Image (cartoon, rainbow, N blue to C red):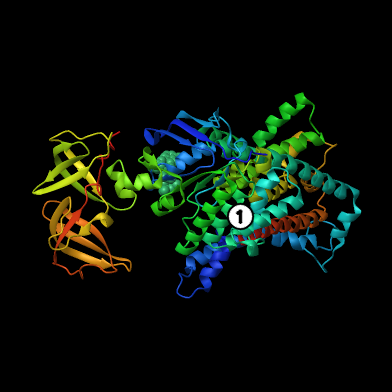
Amino acid sequence: MVRRPGSAGSARRAGAMSGGYGAGRFARGIAWATVLYLVLPITIVLPVSLTDQRFLSLPHEALSLRHYANIFASPAWLGAISQSFMLAVASTALAVAAGTLCAIGCWRLGRRSSEMVRVLMLLPLIIPSIVYAVGLYRWFGKLDLLDRFLGVVLAHAVTGIPYVVITVSAALAAFDPRLEQAARGMGASLPQTLRWVILPRIAPGIASGAIFAFIHSWDELVMVLFITSRQVFTLPRKMWDGINENLDPTMAAVAMLLVVFTIGLLWLDGALRRRRRDA
Amino acid sequence: MSSTAGHALALRGLTRRYGSFVAVRDVSLNVESGEFVTLLGPSGSGKTTMLMMVAGFTEPSEGTILLDGRDITALPPERRDFGMVFQGYALFPHMTVAENVAFPLRVRGLGRAAREEKVRAALDLVQLDRFADRKPAQLSGGQQQRVALARALVFDPALLLLDEPLSALDKKLRGELQEELKALHRRVGRTFINVTHDQEEALRLSDRVAILDHGRLVQQGSPLELYERPATRFVADFLGRSNFLAGVVREVRPGAMALVAGGTRLVQAVAYGAPKLALGTPGLLALRPEKISLLAEGEAADTEVAGEIAAWSYHGTGFALSVQTVDLGLLQVALPAWRAPIAPAEGMAVRLGWPADASVPVAEDSHAA
Ligand SMILES: Nc1ncnc2c1ncn2[C@@H]1O[C@H](COP(=O)(O)OP(=O)(O)OP(=O)(O)O)[C@@H](O)[C@H]1O
Ligand SMILES: [Mg+2]
């Protein structure tokens, strides 16, 4: 199965082709407006993060990296970063395991009931996260999971599952079911078939799902606000508190680091897909 | 380890339905140990469905499958230990050729050294040793097919299932691999079940051919039996080519009968014990083009008919004539080219004849469900 190249790539190719349809003035305008709209917040955050002042503002006299230096000097910021990172790793591992198995199970059954399961798995995407958070708060209170690392891992893992289910299902849709038959016909047990045939074929899909699940946990705020207080203190939570309590430009610096980090992850995702396509 | 002989397989009343559609209908077939059996039939006749039931991937709606007398109908495919070549190869795209061929050995937990040796031998067999490190996508269709064959053979299965293993090869390579397959079958003494819609391949390779049509087993027998004594119009037409002569039974004697079609008397030899047609009923005879001769002046034959050459073509080894007759319609005649009695020309008047045992009575097909 051939994956379509990213839309940006095909647009560029179409533009380079002589005789192709060029974009109209109107379409071009809309496209640039959209790009601006998406990039604009960053264009504010970047200068603010480089400000030479002590409060949230644009640079007055010179650009300064002091707020970046602040991050790495502050145990509170570093603690939040490492906690967020560990949370994201743990919840991603859970989401990948559960989401992948769910997608494979649905794919193998291929009945209408499994279609239902798949829709059910997408619920966390459909339900507004604030509603979800309220529900979690009530249940976690009873289960003694409030303000606990495990509680946040579970919450983020469950809400990260949809990303994995979606990407793995897409990878499986392109998987030739006769390969599984061939493997079993040659005597491979189900675990052997999984390990040697199915998983290597859908690994790029799993990696994509993992990246999205990671990003999801990495910047999730709403649930964290409800189910944590002092023990668990994630990076988005720290930023949120920073905005509410003092207008420290360090936040802008952290935000910039987050943006760079996320772009790095997305680039990795794209690179994995490209490798898959060329293989 | 499996014994030195191949498995014996028995299919009893095998049926497979898809909704109200019957893909395979009540097929019973015995495959002896070490036999080479071919399932032959046109596209959509149910060959792959049959094979997939034997392999365990498709569950029969009715019937049982016996392996050496043991019921394996419910046994999952991975426990049947058959070698299989899928229609369309089903090679693992993420593995190299050598890794593909090594797969069944890896599954069986064979050590690396033993694995490499067997893989090399299997790749040698299909003349692909130079391609061991390529991915399937870097091979031609025929090369992929040979990898699939090597992968099915490498673990020395007692029963080998082949779904059109040679269909993507060019004529020469196909011929070579047919020979190779036949030699291999003789050498290893395993049971082979081959599926094809190529009648020439079926005749060349098989100990026995089972002919399928619309999901039914129409006839089974040795290639010679099927070619010489087709039971139905479908078989006579599908295996080689035939002229069909329709007439009404006028005489029945021991060992022979005669049908009449217009002014032509068709003399037909009848084997002792063969069911006889009743006087006055319609009958159908199948007659191979190569069994018709051109009669010289004054020469006589059991059945004679006059006609006119409507079209002809030259094929190197012979002429193919279409001769228009009044009573029997258009007859196809194959005439050896070397020392042919005539130089064919359109419109030329000819007399055709054949002996009483050249044609065979066949039944009309019953496709009604
Ligand atoms: N999963 C299925 N659902 C419904 N119908 C099916 C299914 N599989 C096969 N059939 C039907 O059963 C019939 C036999 O199919 P099968 O694949 O056995 O044919 P075949 O003899 O192998 O043909 P070919 O030579 O083209 O491979 C076909 O008419 C096909 O449409
Ligand atoms: Mg088929």
- Asked if B38 appears above or below B70 in the picture, the reply is below
Quickly name the residue at label 1: B93
- Asked if A13 appears above or below B359 in the picture, the reply is below
Tell me which amino acid carries mark 1: Pro
Residue B92 shows in this picture: yes
Q: Is residue B164 left or right of residue B290?
A: right
Q: Say which quadrant the N terminus of chain A sits in.
A: bottom right
Disc 1 sits on a residue from what chain? B
Residue B37 drawn at (x, y percent): 47, 43
Q: Residue furthest top?
A: A142
- Judging depth in this view, the residue of B158 and B168 nearest the camera is B158
- Asked if B124 appears above or below B258 in the picture, the reply is below
Q: Is residue B308 left or right of residue B269?
A: left
**Element assignment for label 1:** loop
Quarter of the image for residue A142 reads top right
Residue A240 drawn at (x, y percent): 77, 45
Residue found at x 59% / y 63%? B138
Q: Residue furthest bottom?
A: A18
- Asked if B274 appears above or below A276 in the picture, the reply is above
Residue A41 drawn at (x, y percent): 68, 58
- Judging depth in this view, the residue of B333 and A205 nearest the camera is B333
Residue found at x 59% / y 40%? B5
Residue B105 drawn at (x, y percent): 68, 47
- Judging depth in this view, the residue of B54 and A27 nearest the camera is B54
- Judging depth in this view, the residue of B99 and A62 nearest the camera is B99
